Image (cartoon, rainbow, N blue to C red):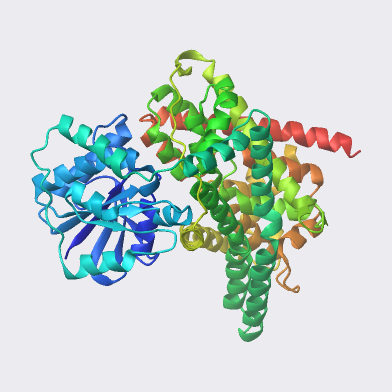
Amino acid sequence: MKNILLVGAPNSGKSALFNQLTGLSHKVANYPGITVDVGTGALRADARLTVWDFPGTYSLTAVSGEEQVAIDTLRTALKSEEQAVVAMVCDATRLEKSATYCLQVARECAQAQKPFLVLLNMMDVIESDGLDMDVQGLSKALGVPVFPVSARTGKGLSEVEAVLVSSTPEISTWGDTPDALISGTATQIAERFAPKGDLLVRRQAKLDNWLLGTLSGGVAFVMIMTLFFQAIFTWAAPLMDGVESIVIAIGSWASSVLPDGVLADFVNDAIFGGLGAFLVFAPLVFILTMIVGALEDSGYLARAALICHRPLSFFGLSGKSFVPLLSGVACAIPAIYAARTMSSRQERLLTYVAIPLMPCSARLPVYALLIAILIPDETVLGGIIGWQGLAMSGIYFFGIMTALIVAAVVSRMGDTATSSQAFILELPAYRMPALKPIVSKSLDRVVHFIRKAGSVIFAVTVVVWFLGYFPNGGEDLSSSWLAALGRFIEPVFSPLGLDWRYGVAIIASFLAREVFVGTLGTIFGIESADEDPASLADQIAASGLTAASGVALVVFFTIALQCVSTVALLAREAKSARFAVQLLLGYLVLAWLVAWLVYSLVSLLLL
């Protein structure tokens, strides 16, 4: 089997090309003999060929530990005896950025006797702006095949696939070229073949003047982030309502078909009460991933990092912390991995401290459930802005500010204070996001979200249902084994106005935050087994949960450390189990104290 090794610089459109070549069907895997994750997928034109999406770097000279791992990964793959073709992705609008790296990889391929070709991406931008580029001349100067392509439109990829399937490109002649000649030749090639004209530069400068301006940049950032949080809840509501209607309809049908007994109660209470209550919130994850992907593809995320550098530095962080922190809005796991690119260990540890406080997607079902109970479902401005969406925005901003405050306190303590370092960041060109890859990635994220949490939730709901159903067949939940266990831990949560049911759900949620909703769904499903099916929010609202307790729950989940997977990864990445355990215990105590304070204040206000 022949492998196609896709390499290139960050922001060159390499992963977008990978998605196009594999037909948007791919997974994360390990290349044989290496230890980092890369994307892999079968070539769309011929499933016998495998495409590997390698980590992006700017050259074969590493400037960070993470880049060194990526470079070692590529060299290990080149040394493999398996048949392979290396495809270098270059940004046609920024040829000067990738020319040196291109020739370096061509030399490595020649030494390893691996065929090499160049995919000149972003040609749609070149053509739409009326610019000229001598692709044939560039190919002759490089001495390798060059294919003009567009990852966004797919133009030119059929020719690339035909070459990869039917023939093998020749091995380049750069094998014995010294570094000095590589550098000089790359500069000459960039000067000669880069698109002439300053239209691209002027357009980017015009947008940067507004999006990075002292006043306008801050206003634009707040507006974009507000719309981001608003979309997570208000704009996802129709999808959530649709999923909820489907779950309730299937649950009603199953209840009517199955004969009365243990099996019917299990399907109704555990499956549709627990898992069904969790599935309702999958659209939130889809919307979240969609928006983050669009911001990244558009080139705005790097600008946001630049805007945030100065305010983040006040809290002991830097603009480089922005991307890991924003990744934490989706999930703490990739956020912790994203912090690897930070060269300072002190700054990396401080970022680790802040990441668990970011409102991750696993908390979304909890927030959405409590907001649906506490906040009326009303909108303003013609339905664009909803009160529930504003509440979600408030929760997110509260979590972010808590993370920054904690980081500021920790940064001023002991040896965790960060050292002063130059802040260098590449600003990618502004581009229109490619819809299909973003939708595909969002769907993959939802499937991963459901698979990862679904198995845990199913296991927990089975245990919760079993303990709540016996020994009296679900006739009296208050006298069940689950109630006895809940009352044992109830004193911990009763100061927050929460009874044993919520205590059980909170304890279970440390396996995965989403389990909180599934556990409550199972408990309330058992309690209302003889009633018509209704949404979990309606059932909890009818049970008498007070506003003070609901707000306290939101605060607790915002501050308490995330799932056990996060703790395990923090211990591994920080190379300190003590560090991870201290964070876990510290945030638990802080979460309870702040939740109790908020509960007391809200209770006084509502008197």
Whether residue 481 appears in this view of the structure is no
Q: Quadrant of the N terminus?
A: bottom left
Whether residue 330 appears in this view of the structure is yes
What residue do we see at 25% from left, 49% from top? 138
User: Residue 185, image x and y in percent?
Assistant: 21, 37
Q: In this view, does 19 lie above or below 307?
A: below
Q: In which quarter of the image is the C terminus?
A: top right
| Nearer the observer, 290 or 191 | 191
Q: Quadrant of residue 255?
A: bottom right
Farthest residue to the top: give it.
Answer: 414
User: Residue 296, image x and y in percent?
Assistant: 50, 47
What residue do we see at 67% from left, 68% from top? 244
Q: Is residue 307 left or right of residue 78?
A: right
User: Residue 121, image x and y in percent?
Assistant: 36, 53
What residue do we see at 51% from left, 61% from top? 435
Q: In this view, does 184 lie to the left or right of 525?
A: left
